[in-house]
Image: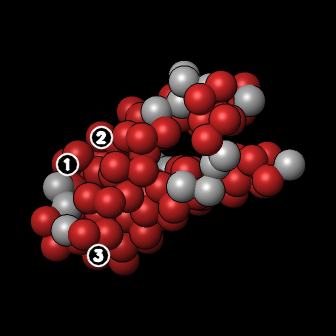
Amino acid sequence: MRNDLVIEKMLSLIERIEGFCKSVEFASFSDNDMLIDACVFNLSQIGEQVNKIDEDFETAHPEIPWRQVYGLRNRIVHDYEGVNLKLVWEIIQSDLPSLKDKLLKL
């Protein structure tokens, strides 16, 4: 049950980021500090949620890149000033839709 709640929270956070970035191009994203802060915060929160997943559940679903998602959280939290905006944008555009699809299949 707890894992279900964590997955729902992760999906909610992904949807927030999707909403923030709808119809936005990288140039607009990179010039908007509030948008950057909102997206980076929500990405870090997705990583925080991964840390709440039961180990057995994580092992049972290797199709989800659990450690990479948590690793991004660590990079954001420990080196916020050094966050690569192009990488963040690529994650939002390429990796989040894939992660969302995989989470929805759980």
Distance in Å between CA atoms under marks 3 and 1: 14 Å
Instruction: Depth check: give the residue in front, 104 or 66.
Output: 66
Q: Amino acid at mark 3?
A: Asp
Instruction: Depth check: give the residue in front, 8 or 56.
Output: 56
Q: Earlier in the sequence, mark 2 or mark 3?
A: 3
The residue depicted at 17 percent of the width and 55 percent of the height is 84
Looking at the figure, which quarter contains the C terminus? top right
Q: Secondary structure at mark 3?
A: helix
Residue receiving disc 3? 33
Kindly indicate whether the residue at mark 3 contacts the one at mark 2 (C-beta within 8 angstroms): no
Q: Is residue 32 visible?
A: no
Kindly indicate whether the residue at mark 2 contacts the one at mark 1 (C-beta within 8 angstroms): yes
- Is 101 on the left or on the right of 91, as rendered? right
Density class for disc 3 (Cα within 10 Å; few <14, some 14-19, many ≥20) is few
Which quarter of the picture shows residue 37?
A: bottom left
Q: Secondary structure at mark 1?
A: helix
Q: Which mark is residue 10?
A: none
- Is 28 on the left or on the right of 41, as rendered? left
Q: Amino acid at mark 1?
A: Lys
Work out whether 62 lies above or below 52.
Answer: above
Q: Secondary structure at mark 2?
A: helix
Density class for disc 1 (Cα within 10 Å; few <14, some 14-19, many ≥20) is few
Density class for disc 2 (Cα within 10 Å; few <14, some 14-19, many ≥20) is few
The residue depicted at 65 percent of the width and 25 percent of the height is 60
Farthest residue to the front: give it: 56
Instruction: Depth check: give the residue in front, 99 or 92.
Output: 99
Q: Amino acid at mark 2?
A: Glu
The residue depicted at 19 percent of the width and 48 percent of the height is 86
Q: Which mark is residue 86?
A: 1
Residue 68 screen position, x and y as percent = 38, 40
Residue receiving disc 2? 90
